[in-house]
Image (tube, rainbow, N blue to C red):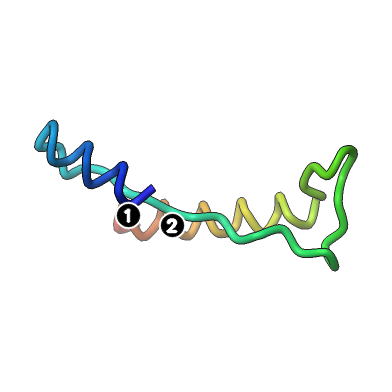
Amino acid sequence: MEQAAAAYTNQTGDTNISVMKFDVQLWEDDFGADWHPSEATHTKAADKLIANIKEVMEW
């Protein structure tokens, strides 16, 4: 993802871009149907995304 973001910036000059990786789903957080993320995994992902947006936006 970092390489794709860097390539985009190099091609366009747009530096207003951010990359964030989500954590790997944990066995102890369980799984939904057909290995989909559980509610616990979604909650962790949402919390991480919110924190990242606040940091990027300087809120």
SS at circle 1: helix
Q: Residue at the far left: name it.
A: 13
Asked if marks 1 and 2 touch (Cβ < 8 Å), the reply is yes
- In the image, what residue occupies the spot 22% across and 36% down? 8
Q: Which mark is residue 56?
A: 1
Give residue 56's quadrant in the image: bottom left
Give residue 41's quadrant in the image: bottom right
Q: Say above or below: 56 vs 7.
A: below
Q: For marks 1 and 2, give the CA distance.
A: 6 Å
28 left or right, relative to 47: right
- In the image, what residue occupies the spot 51% across and 53% down? 50
22 left or right, relative to 55: right
Where is residue 39 drawn, in percent x and y?
Answer: 80, 50
Q: Which mark is residue 52?
A: 2
45 left or right, relative to 16: right
Where is residue 2 drawn, in percent x and y?
Answer: 33, 52
Where is residue 9 drawn, in percent x and y?
Answer: 17, 40
Which corner quadrant holds the C terminus?
A: bottom left
How busy is the neighbourhood of tag 1: few (under 14 within 10 Å), some, or many (20 plus)?
A: few
